[in-house]
Amino acid sequence: MTLEGIMAIGQEAIKTILLVAGPMLGLSLVVGLMVSAFQAMTQINEMTLTFLPKIATMFVVLLFLFPWMVEIIVGFMTGIWLQIPEMAQ
């Protein structure tokens, strides 16, 4: 296993992580900003108010995108498992 191979696997892993986690984190960010704007407009300073909408958003995104996320992760892991014989040489 060369350094280039290790770097390629690391880059692919980071791409996979960003691809799988990106939609949940992005929508959670948008919902958090909307709740924060609502809090600023109404002057409600409750720290825990943002957690429930963010968690609900993440569960909804996970509910709809779970099959796609599993497909991406399985594809990545299949590629890693198929590279094991090449790495052993």
Image (cartoon, rainbow, N blue to C red):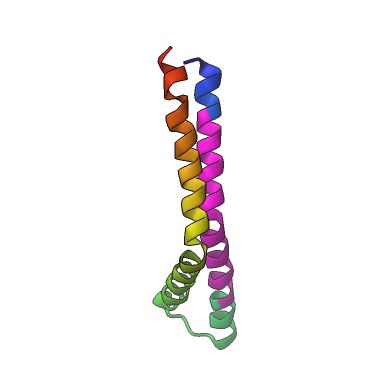
52 or 82: nearer the eye?
A: 82
Task: Indicate the position of residue 5 as horizontal and vertical percent values.
Answer: 53, 21
When the figure is inspected, residue 84 is found, relative to residue 57, above or below; the finding is above
**Residue projecting furthest to the bottom:** 42
Quadrant of the image for the C terminus? top left
Task: Indicate the position of residue 69 as horizontal and vertical percent values.
Answer: 50, 54
20 or 89: nearer the eye?
A: 89
Residue located at (59% from left, 77% from top): 37
Residue located at (42% from left, 80% from top): 46
Residue located at (49% from left, 85% from top): 44
**Residue projecting furthest to the top:** 89
Total number of numbered discs in the rendering: 0
Start-end of magenta stretch:
9-34
Task: Indicate the position of residue 12 as horizontal and vertical percent values.
Answer: 55, 35
Task: Indicate the position of residue 29 as horizontal and vertical percent values.
Answer: 55, 65
Give the overall secondary structure of the magenta segment: helix
When the figure is inspected, residue 69 is found, relative to residue 50, above or below; the finding is above
Is 30 magenta? The answer is yes
Residue located at (46% from left, 37% from top): 78
Is 10 magenta? The answer is yes
